[in-house]
Image (cartoon, rainbow, N blue to C red):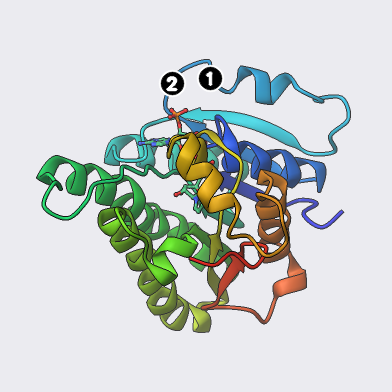
């Protein structure tokens, strides 16, 4: 088991990639604080396969954009566990708009959820990690943040910011024993991907070299690697999980 005795916080774990990361971490023996914003939305995740897992999943409800909620969650982890080994900034939103149609509220909501929350949670989490002299922060970027995509200027800019944040933080935190990496998924079969609409899903899917859309577990397994000691000398990297998607 790769994450035995690790304490992890995974944001946006009510569904999609985040739910899969929380499940895989618990299978590897971790105590996982799984975050969601709607009370009760983690019930199914906590109950599913509870007996078969070696680790545990503990729900922590807060909106990642709410500073007080972030702080309360980190304080709860500190009180209950006294440490935090892994932070996965996974929660994210995507709203497509062509240039000329972009409104300020979309930019604001996208950056608050995808970027500001990652910066703020990283600050809080690394306070605990400093004391341990170790930790791993995993930021969810996107292939769109690396390559850009038509109609996705705002989302691409937010995911590009996540990459810059990761690289800068990795440099700053390496002397403290804290690693910071980003994952850049391509097209992964979740609600977010399907929200692009049937025509777009078909068009995107035909651009994948490996001939299939990714599964949330494909991303979760890379997160297990980045969370574990297997990646102990890996920091400041952006790991693509895209089955050779062309974009
Ligand atoms: N699927 C893809 O193809 C793909 C590709 C590249 C990158 N990504 C990235 O991977 C991450 C996960 O995406 P996904 O495909 O799993 O999306 P998803 O199925 O839409 O799930 C997004 C998750 O984020 C949560 N969330 C959103 N805003 C939140 C907030 N303010 N506070 C707390 N939780 C919040 C959602 O919670 P609710 O249930 O409350 O809405 C949900 O659990 C995102 O950062 C996304 O940008 C996805």
User: What is the x, y in percent for residue 244?
Assistant: 64, 68
| Residue 60 falls left or right of residue 210 | left
Please tell me whether mark 2 sits on a helix, a strand or a loop: loop
Cβ at disc 1 under 8 Å from ligand 1: yes
User: Observer-nearest residue: 135 or 219?
Assistant: 219
Q: Is residue 96 above or below residue 37?
A: below
Q: State the residue in front, 166 or 217.
A: 217
Tag 2 residue: 38
Q: Secondary structure at mark 1?
A: loop
Q: Is 198 situated left or right of 124 in this image?
A: right
Residue identified by numbered label 1: 41
Q: Is mark 2 within 8 Å of ligand 1?
A: yes
Q: Position of residue 26 (x, y in %)?
A: 75, 41
Q: How many marks?
A: 2
Task: Measuring from the top left, give residue 77's x and y in whole percent.
Answer: 54, 41
The residue positioned 88% from the left and 30% from the top of the image is: 52
Q: Is residue 161 left or right of residue 215?
A: left
């Amino acid at each position: 088991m790769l994450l035995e005795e690790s304490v992890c916080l995974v944001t946006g774990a009510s569904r999609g990639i985040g739910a899969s990361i929380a499940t895989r971490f618990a299978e590897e023996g971790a105590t996982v604080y799984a975050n969601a914003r709607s009370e009760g939305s983690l019930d199914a995740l906590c109950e599913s396969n509870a007996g078969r897992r070696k680790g545990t999943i503990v729900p922590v409800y807060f909106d990642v954009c709410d500073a007080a909620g972030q702080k309360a969650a980190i304080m709860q982890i500190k009180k209950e566990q006294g440490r935090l080994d892994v932070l996965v900034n996974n929660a994210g939103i995507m709203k497509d708009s062509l240039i000329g149609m972009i409104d300020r509220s979309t930019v604001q909501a996208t950056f608050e959820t995808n970027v500001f929350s990652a910066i703020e949670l990283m600050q809080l989490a690394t306070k605990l990690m400093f004391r341990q002299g170790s930790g791993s922060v995993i930021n969810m970027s996107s292939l769109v943040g690396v390559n850009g995509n038509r109609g996705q200027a705002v989302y691409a800019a937010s995911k590009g910011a996540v990459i810059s944040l990761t690289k800068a933080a990795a440099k700053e935190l390496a002397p403290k024993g804290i690693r910071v990496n980003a994952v850049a998924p391509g097209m992964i079969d979740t609600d977010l991907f399907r929200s692009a609409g049937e025509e777009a899903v078909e068009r995107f899917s035909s651009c994948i070299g490996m001939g299939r859309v990714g599964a949330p577990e494909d991303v979760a397994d890379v997160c297990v690697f980045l969370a574990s000691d297997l990646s102990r000398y890996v920091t400041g990297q952006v790991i693509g999980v895209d089955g050779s998607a062309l974009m």
